[in-house]
Amino acid sequence: MVTVSTGELAVVGMGVVGPGISGPADALAPAGAAAPGWFRAQVALPGRGYRRLPDACKYLLAASRLAVGDAGDRLTQTERDHRGAAVAINNTGAALLEAMDRTIMREGAAEMSPSSSPFIAMSSFASRLSMEHDITGFNLTVNSPVTAGLEALQIAARAVAAARARAVLVGAVEEALSPSQSRAPALGSSPQSSAVGSPLCSSALGSSLSSAPGTEVGAAVLHCEPAVGGCARYGTCRARGAFLAPGVAARDAPAVLGPLVGDDPPGRIDAVLDDSAVGTAAARWLDRLTGTCEVVIVPAPAQAGCLTPLQRVVGLFAQEHTAPTRRAVLAASAQGTLAYAELTVTPRGGSSLEPCAPRVAAEGGK
Amino acid sequence: MNTFDSVPRVVITGLGAICCLGTGVGAYWGGLLAGGGEPEAIPLPHLNMRTKKMYLVDRAQVPAEPSCHAGVELGSSPRLAVAAAEQALTDAKVEDGARVTVPVVLGVELGNSDMQELQRSAGRTTWTTLTPAAAVVGAAIGSRAAQTSVGNACSASGYALTIGLDMIRAGEASTVLVGGAEGATRAGMGAFNRLGAADPVRCRPFDRNRAGTMFGDGSAMIVLEAADHARRRGVEPYAELAGAAWSCDAHHATAPDPSGDQIVRAMSDALADAKLSSADVGCVIPHGTGTPLNDVVESQALHRVFGSRMPELPLFSLKAMIGHTTGAAGAFACLTATLMLRHRQSPANTPVDQDPECDVWLPQERPVPLAAPAVLVNTYAFGGNNTSLVVKGIGMGIGKDVSGEASRWSQ
């Protein structure tokens, strides 16, 4: 089986927002603790109309502003119907969803917050991007566990190849789980839990108890264009996916990961993996690349979201090289989804990046 | 212009469905002809809200398995998805050995929410993924290809179908399983109650007394396939997914842009993608949810696309029969369009006391023969995320289950 990816994207601008992160160059650092006040919305999003948005929506908007600003005027020079957004979410609305449901359970739906209620549709986090940047081409939300961020790159590339857009903001956003949500499942079952069906799936017990705690907070956005005719200021990328069934992960890993990674691996692969059956099988398979390329295992918690893989893409693009340099990010979920993004980083010296030439007049203006 | 090396035609070779009308495509079509389903009380605790009904799958027909995937206890959505997926792949004669290369693209919004809500009511709060369904389907069918979950709320499976279409056009896959699956949801119902968008009576799009939408659960699955691939396998397609387009209002968090400009663009671009004109459309399955402004805006937009044809262009108001299946709505609509083309008719609509502001033709007396070879499907969502799809009939001798009479569409 051949794993195919369609289209290649040029990365023009990048923005990242997260605890302890001041810019793309910090994106490869271990995630910082989300101390209270780490995100200052009034600084990141000056102006009106943001106050009642959930914080996660603000992270995404702030990261998008950074990415769009980083790319100069390229987005505004793209006709609005040719602007798109592809945004990954996993746990983004989890705490909010729980809070809304608890309000229903305790007080009734009439007591729900009217400003929060639209976010029952998890695509509402991404939809706000369209109003912020006047994006009318498309606005797409991907919610595959863990791999959604890299899948968003793939979907954006395919959509650009299909002429559905000429500039796409590709992003991922996550919010911390509530304290009760991030608690590892207890051993055994309570009388209450037995009323719900099987008290605990066995593999959940195994993986959750042995994984590191922690959830992701923040957002990453890449301003992308077609590689042909676009401005590869940071470089180019393409992505593809595969599936490794958890029940047969160890057996199938070579047959799945081989075609996914290909026979010409880059100099470095950052692999975002948890200790599930799938993550473990992927890590073991990657061992065979020792001596061929550098494999950086990025440990993921059992309740990982989709931000870290895309954040690794941002971090790898932010590194300085004197020649075109190939990198890759691999992500795997306990559910079996796999995604792989190949990057070619544009060489640059020092800390300065060359600005892009303005888009041609035919594409200009709204 | 797209940059694909060649653009193969994409056909529909398999269908699967489970919803309030029953299990299987035969039961589904029969249910539409019989006038659709009726809302029932939602089987979830702590439903502290005014409107508590949905169009529900008969709970006896909700499969018990798979009950667990990679540590996630599964609610009805992924189990319904697996059942519908099996139907669709069997229908398309995609045997076990061929399934390994079949990608899955699902529209799923609050997929596993019913399980999470049951757990929450029982005092269990640990978070697990809300959207395991695509991976669950992948494992169930034995796929090693990509499994993608799209979360664009009520247009999620419209986006999923377009992604599947583009995957085949790009040459990434010869066969893609696409669909949507949703279960019951207390939080979703509560939010729509709070927003004043939950009709307490039934789902009644275009009705003068409509008061919001009413949800439905279920799963619809569609096998998309490159036409040449289907031909080589000797499988006769039902219809062609001939075109698709996306747009975004960029207007408001929940309300549609009253101008309708972007939904007009989506419809027009989908027809252009299909290389068809508005005259080639024999029926429209509107998004038509029953929310007051949406139905008016869509009605007006249809007039801009179809002009003087509107009095003779039938609309089939699907959600009045199966409820608003949110993330699965586009898949159900595409499946319905396919069955219409197979049977050459649009079922009679549920009786409606029509809003004069919604100046569309909703035939209610009897089924209406299709007078043109394509059906247009619209799906819209919060945030103004729009898709339009064009499903096109295939002429005599090619279409599945087509009787011997000559098709005027192929002449």
Image: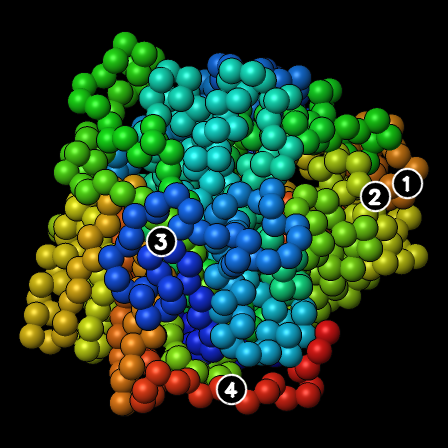
Q: Are marks 2 and 4 on the same chain?
A: no
Residue at image mark 4: A356
Alpha carbon distance from label 2 to label 4: 44 Å
Amino acid type of the residue that numbered disc 3 sits on in the rendered structure: Pro
Residue at image mark 1: B357
Alpha carbon distance from label 1 to label 4: 50 Å
Residue under mark 1: which chain is it in? B
Dot 1, crowdedness within 10 Å: few (<14), some or many (≥20)? some
Q: Are marks 1 and 2 in contact (CB under 8 Å)?
A: yes
- Which of B283/A214 is in front? A214
Secondary structure of residue under mark 2? helix
Residue at image mark 3: A19
Residue at image mark 2: B296
Q: Are marks 4 and 3 in contact (CB under 8 Å)?
A: no
Mark before the other along the chain sequence, 4 or 3: 3
Alpha carbon distance from label 3 to label 2: 45 Å
Amino acid type of the residue that numbered disc 1 sits on in the rendered structure: Glu
Q: Residue at x 59, y 71 (%)?
A: A165
Residue under mark 2: which chain is it in? B
Alpha carbon distance from label 3 to label 1: 51 Å
Amino acid type of the residue that numbered disc 4 sits on in the rendered structure: Cys
- When asked about the image quadrant of residue A252, the answer is bottom left
Residue under mark 4: which chain is it in? A
Q: Are marks 3 and 1 on the same chain?
A: no
Mark before the other along the chain sequence, 1 or 2: 2
- Which of A312/B100 is in front? A312
